[in-house]
Amino acid sequence: MLAFLKNLFASIVGTVKKAFGSQADREFKKGTPIIDEINRHCEALAPLSDAELFARTEQFRQRLRERTAALTGEVAELETSLRGDLEPGEREGLNDRHQAVEEEIHAIQASFLDEVQAEAFAVVRDACRRLVGRSWDVMGGAEEWFMQPYDVQLYGGTVLHSGKVAEMATGEGKTLVAVAPLYLNALTGMVVTSLRTTITWPSAMLCGWAAFTISSACPSG
């Protein structure tokens, strides 16, 4: 009887999956619009020179600076005032305002990153395409770059950017998935979580090609 019930349950689950797809399939379908948008941006990037593609990073950052310029200036003024000799109540008020302005800046940055996510992911994908066939010296030997993010890997990157966990099996390109959201979030000039992998050669290879676009997005020093 127990075996019959197990088989019946498995049959029902299989029928439901065929009709509606697995949870992973349904989640991926939700990401179809942004994947299509990334691919449209990739088509527009294709005719650009390498220098023009590289310049996109500074263009992103300039757009963000323009949106936060007034608030950034206010933060600088507040920090100058806070270095002075202040009464406790006045200092508390300035600290409260400083915190409020910082939070407003962070909100603007988060909104901007969501806005340019497809454009930024396209820059990373096109950089991968351009670097296919180039080689780096990795662990004492030449390794040729051959990877371009598939749609499912780009989707994984959007999941990471949203603050969720992207579960992937070994060999599905988890290391490559992480690069696009790292690049996107580095546009703020703030420190982002570093990319770590236990597999040495992909890490070294990614360092080589990612510098093509990511180095100018990360703060120096």
Image (cartoon, rainbow, N blue to C red):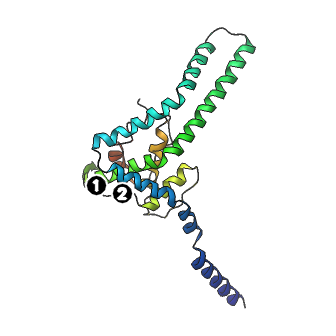
Residue 198 seen in the current view: no
Task: Please state which amino acid type lies under the numbered disc 2.
Answer: Gln
Cβ atoms at labels 2 and 1 below 8 Å apart: yes
Residue at 35%, 54% in the rendered image: 43
The percent position of residue 95, horizontal first and vertical second, equals: 67, 21
The percent position of residue 58, horizontal first and vertical second, equals: 39, 35
Element marked by disc 2: loop
Residue at 25%, 51% in the rendered image: 135
Q: Quadrant of the C terminus?
A: top left
The percent position of residue 206, horizontal first and vertical second, equals: 36, 49
Q: Residue furthest top?
A: 85
Task: Please state which amino acid type lies under the numbered disc 1.
Answer: Val
Residue at 46%, 34% in the rendered image: 63
The span from disc 2 to disc 1 (Cα, nearest Å) is: 8 Å
Image position of 97 (left or right of 140)? right
Q: Between 183 and 52, which is closer to the camera in this rendering?
A: 52
The percent position of residue 147, horizontal first and vertical second, equals: 34, 57
Q: Which residue is mark 2?
A: 148
Residue 134 seen in the current view: yes
Residue at 56%, 67% in the rendered image: 24
Q: Which residue is mark 1?
A: 132
N-term-proximal mark, 2 vs 1: 1
